[in-house]
Image (tube, rainbow, N blue to C red):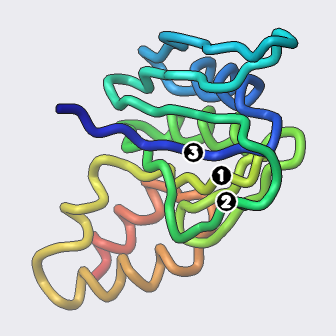
Amino acid sequence: MSVTTFLWFDTDAEAAAQLYTATVPNSRITEITRQGDGSAFVIELDLDGHAVTLMNGGPGHPHSDAASLQVVVDTQAEIDRIWDALTEAGGAPGPCGWLTDRFGVSWQVVPAVLPKLMSGEPDRVIAVGTTLRAMSKLDIAELQQAYDRA
């Protein structure tokens, strides 16, 4: 048995696959099933060990922020690089580390330290939560300062 994330696209699955594998380290396209005209139909990816399948299924099934891909990173440089790549060319920043890429897929780009900063003493949790809710792209140093000041 296996579990995979499956995303429906109108026509841009192959372009999305190329962006995602170029953006997320240790990622690759593992298989492309093509239609009779040569266009991609189903594309299988390995995003740093996470199986994702993309399909060009035509209109009628838009993406929603009710489901997102989450990338957990260690450094601010990684947040910045991934955020910039995914919001480039028509993507849009969202609140609290969320964004929507140019294909309409929602992502969360969050630092690995966030669970530590969001647990423990209630004053610290409140301070970090308040700071986080005021952000779009997350800033590790600012979140850490909120934690340390509380």
Q: Amino acid at mark 3?
A: Leu
Dot in front, 1 or 3: 3
Residue 41, position in %: x, y?
A: 69, 25
Nearer the observer, 98 or 49? 49
Where residue 27 appears, x then y in whole percent? 47, 17
Report crowding for label 3: few under 14, some 14 to 19, many 20 or more residues within 10 A (C-alpha): some
Mark 1 — residue? 105
State yes or no: discs 2 and 3 in contact (Cβ < 8 Å). yes
Of residue 78 and residue 57, the one placed in the foreground of this image is 57
Q: Earlier in the sequence, mark 2 or mark 1?
A: 2
Rendered position, 111 above or below 74: below
Tags 2 and 1 touching, CB below 8 Å: yes
Left or right for 124, reference 132: left
Question: Would you name the residue on which mark 3 appears?
Answer: 7
The quadrant of the rendering that contains the C terminus is bottom left
- Badge number at residue 63: 2
Q: Quadrant of residue 4?
A: top left
Q: Residue at x 49, y 43 (%)?
A: 6
Name which quarter of the figure residue 94 lies in.
bottom right
